[in-house]
């Protein structure tokens, strides 16, 4: 072997890796930057879930309040109707007492030409008791 061939062989031998795994080490590694989030996905899910529950609770609270208000208005209307009916009933009871007055009955009987044979005129309410 000549000296130039020996040098070429020596240079080629030094350039060849002894272990093939070392070749991967010589390559540049690409670093992937992992962006660290301020809020984790679990926290995002939890916040979303709790927000949805809060909105549902608020919706049902407002709905319940509206229903209660509507029912209260209906009750007040019915109470006012009952009071008006009670006043009307009292007026009608007063008229019944007025029309069943024995003096009035005798006056109407005389106007229509009726005569009283017995002078005992009794109110109808006293008879039924």
Image: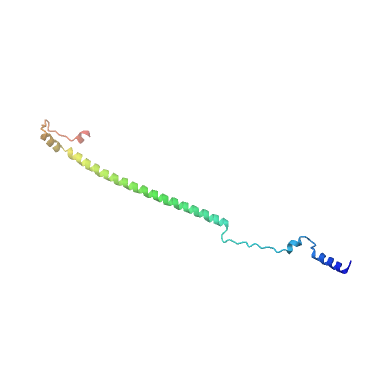
Give the residue displayed 79% in from the left and 65% down from the top.
15
In the rendered image, residue 126, in percent from the top left (x then y), is placed at 20, 35
Vertical order, 104 against 40 (above or below): above
Asked if residue 85 lies left or right of residue 34, the reply is: left
| The N terminus lies in quadrant | bottom right
Question: Relative to the observer, which residue lies in front, 123 or 52?
Answer: 52
Question: Relative to the observer, which residue lies in front, 4 or 63?
Answer: 4
In the rendered image, residue 75, in percent from the top left (x then y), is placed at 34, 46
| The C terminus lies in quadrant | top left
Display coloring = rainbow
Asked if residue 100 lies left or right of residue 3, the reply is: left
In the rendered image, residue 59, in percent from the top left (x then y), is placed at 44, 51
Asked if residue 110 lies left or right of residue 52, the reply is: left
Give the residue displayed 42% in from the left and 50% down from the top.
63
Vertical order, 36 against 72 (above or below): below
Vertical order, 98 against 51 (above or below): above
Question: Relative to the observer, which residue lies in front, 31 or 110?
Answer: 31
In the rendered image, residue 37, in percent from the top left (x then y), is placed at 58, 61
Vertical order, 7 against 20 (above or below): below
Asked if residue 29 lies left or right of residue 88, the reply is: right
Q: Quadrant of residue 22?
A: bottom right
Give the residue displayed 27% in from the left and 45% down from the top.
84
Give the residue displayed 41% in from the left and 49% down from the top.
64
**Looking at the image, which residue sits at the far right?**
1
Q: Count the marks.
A: 0
């Amino acid at each position: 072997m000549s000296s130039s061939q020996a040098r070429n062989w020596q240079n080629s031998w030094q350039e060849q890796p002894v272990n093939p795994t070392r070749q991967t080490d010589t390559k540049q590694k690409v670093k992937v930057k992992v962006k660290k989030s301020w809020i984790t996905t679990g926290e995002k899910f939890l916040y979303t879930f709790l927000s949805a529950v809060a909105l549902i609770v608020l919706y049902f609270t407002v709905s319940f309040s509206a229903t209660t208000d509507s029912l209260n208005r209906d009750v007040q209307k019915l109470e006012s109707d009952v009071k008006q009916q009670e006043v009307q009933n009292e007026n009608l009871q007063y008229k019944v007492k007025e029309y069943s007055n024995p003096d009035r009955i005798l006056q109407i009987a005389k106007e229509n030409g009726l005569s009283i044979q017995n002078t005992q005129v009794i109110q109808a309410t006293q008879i039924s008791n």
